Amino acid sequence: MTVHTGRHFLQIPGPTNIPDRVLRAMDMPTMDHRGPEFGQLGLEVLAAAQRVFRTRQPVIIYPSSGTGAWEAAIVNTLSPGDKVLMAETGQFAVLWRGIAEKFKLDVDFVPGDWRRGADLEQIEARLATVEPDVEVLLAEVKSTPAHPTLRLFIDHPDGVTLALCEQVSSDLSDYRDRYALEVSSPGQDRPLTKPQHYKRFLGRRARVRLRAECAGSRSLTGELVGASEQDVTIAADDGLVTIPFEQIARSNLVPGD
């Protein structure tokens, strides 16, 4: 007989491992679901749910499997005929596609091999076909213990509105299966990721983080005074510095300049 020491943890999307303090709090007789205590608990939960969802309107709770939550997400945010972009990153992504097609959505499905995450270049390329005036300034994945976040900074000739961010989020709805999705305007510390970005903002101050040290530092701040297809020149405190693009890890405008 094999004896296992310690506590077993099931490393799959569910069920959730329950902390010991929660298990101890549950170690009591089951509440009568027809009794007054359960009714009062239900009212308290519904009131707290209003605060969670930041609404004063009634919150309706219905039981379902995870598939039911998917269906609710689709019917509450999309309509038949809406175009959505989906990427094949695993079995859940395939199931998402099946549900989307049942609700008559126009699915643009990017095939994958299940071993790798979403291809960010493909995201930008596909978005260019459905939102041709939207420029993806930066797409990055921020990993957290709970869930990785796919963060997109976008721009538009007429400016970035909340409605545009919502539309881009809708176009990328399938990525929500794998990532928490954030779409926003570039803000004051606008990311600079392409040669044309540096050319556009000549005369502005920028902060450039390097892949390797330059003059004893991996970060330079100064005025943008030159830019080509191969490099950018900054007037830093120690003088002019020309940096090849392949040495730049990240660059942003300095806010308030």
Image (cartoon, rainbow, N blue to C red):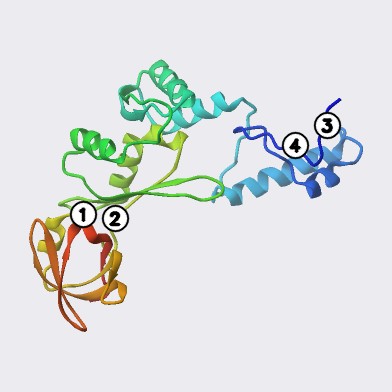
Q: Do the residues labelled 1 and 3 touch (CB within 8 Å)?
A: no
Query: Which one is in front in this view, the residue at disc 1 or the one at disc 3?
Result: 1
Give the mark toward the camera: 3 or 2. Answer: 2
Separation of marks 2 and 4 at Cα, in angstroms: 44 Å
Foreground residue among 128 and 167: 128
Mark 4 or mark 3: which comes first in sequence?
Answer: 4
> Vertical placement of 253 versus 59: above or below?
below
Q: Name the residue under label 4.
A: 8
Residue at horizontal 31 percent and vertical 35 percent from the top? 171
User: Is residue 221 placed above or below 7 in the rendered structure?
Assistant: below
- Is 57 in front, or is 151? 151
Q: Do the residues labelled 2 and 1 touch (CB within 8 Å)?
A: yes
User: Tag 3 or tag 1, which sits nearer the N-term?
Assistant: 3
* Mark 2–mark 1 distance (CA, rounded to whole Å): 8 Å
Kind of residue sitting beneath label 1: Gly
Type of amino acid under label 2: Ser
Residue picked out by circle 3 = 33
Front position among marks 2 and 4: 4
Query: Which quadrant, please, contains the N terminus?
Result: top right
- Whichever of labels 4 and 1 marks the residue nearer the N terminus, that label is 4
Q: Mark 2 points at which residue?
A: 185
- Residue 159: give its label: 1
**Identity, as a three-letter code, of the amino acid under mark 3:** His
How many other residues sit within 10 Å of disc 4, few (<14), some (14-19) or many (≥20)?
A: few
Marks 4, 3: nearer the viewer: 4
